[in-house]
Image: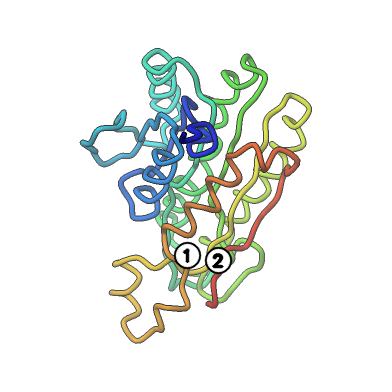
Amino acid sequence: MTNTTSNQPLQGQVVIVTGAAGALGRAVVDRFSLLGARVAQLDVIAISNDHYCDTCDLTDAAAVQSAVARIVRELGAVNIVANIAGGFAMGETVHETKAETWDFLMGLNASSVLNMARAAVPHMLKQGAGKFVNVGAEPGQRGAALMGAYAASKSVVIRLTETMAEELKEQGINVNCVLPSIIDTERNRSDMPDADFSRWVTPEAMARVVSFLASADADPIHGAAIPVTGLS
């Protein structure tokens, strides 16, 4: 007889996946669905599939509040948030960084995390449990030439993760983040056609790490920033 609980350890859990239309977002949605979760997808791009879908500008705090409230009304809870949404840009020195570049990266990478925290954490506090998994980046640990705005925005993600973990761990809420280097996506292959793609991390492998941090096995882990870099 099949053990449904062991095969689908997140059975019935409500998971919000931001950036669900992207390559990593789609892999994370598929992974959580496989584990039995009820997935709510948020993205600025419209999505149409069998899961709950909603369009939302994650840099708009009011829009995020409304989107999360709708999810709670429709699905009954918010047990897990996977903050997959993010953006990348490089090529400008710090002293040449345009305001548009800075605002874009800080908005999509950092403000999106803050907005989801504001909207979802109050529901988790009422439930007395929850999991937050954010996506930082390897460059968030240390500055690199021509990547100042990107590195700064991902550093904010790491610091927010650590701070939220300290604030919420006594209330049964785990907050952690993953730090990818290069993910094996069509876009990255197109941008770096001469690279050895086998050294990169696949979206599916990254999704497994995200789902681990959202599982009961990760209950003792708070404020971790886990590098997921493959061989790159």
Residue 29 is situated, as x and y percent measured from the top left of the image, at 38, 42
Question: Is residue 164 depicted above or below 147 in this figure?
Answer: above
Residue closest to the eye, 32 or 173:
32
Residue 46 is situated, as x and y percent measured from the top left of the image, at 23, 37
| Residue tagged 2 | 148
Question: Is residue 203 depicted above or below 78 in this figure?
Answer: below
Q: In this orientation, does residue 115 appear?
A: no
* Residue beneath the point at 21% across and 36% down: 48
Residue 126 is situated, as x and y percent measured from the top left of the image, at 63, 14
Q: In the image as oriented, which residue stretches furthest toward the front?
A: 1
Q: Pointer 2 and pointer 1: residues touching (CB < 8 Å)? A: yes
Q: Earlier in the sequence, mark 2 or mark 1?
A: 1
Residue closest to the eye, 172 or 217:
217
The circle drawn on residue 97 is 1
**Residue 160 falls in which quadrant of the image?**
top right
Callout 1 secondary element: loop
**Residue 71 falls in which quadrant of the image?**
top left
Q: Amino acid at mark 2?
A: Gly
In the image, which is nearer the foreground, mark 2 or mark 1?
2
Q: In the image as oriented, which residue stretches furthest toward the left?
A: 48
**Residue 23 falls in which quadrant of the image?**
bottom left
Callout 2 secondary element: helix
Give the distance between the C-alpha atoms of the residues marked 2 and 1, in whole angstroms. 8 Å
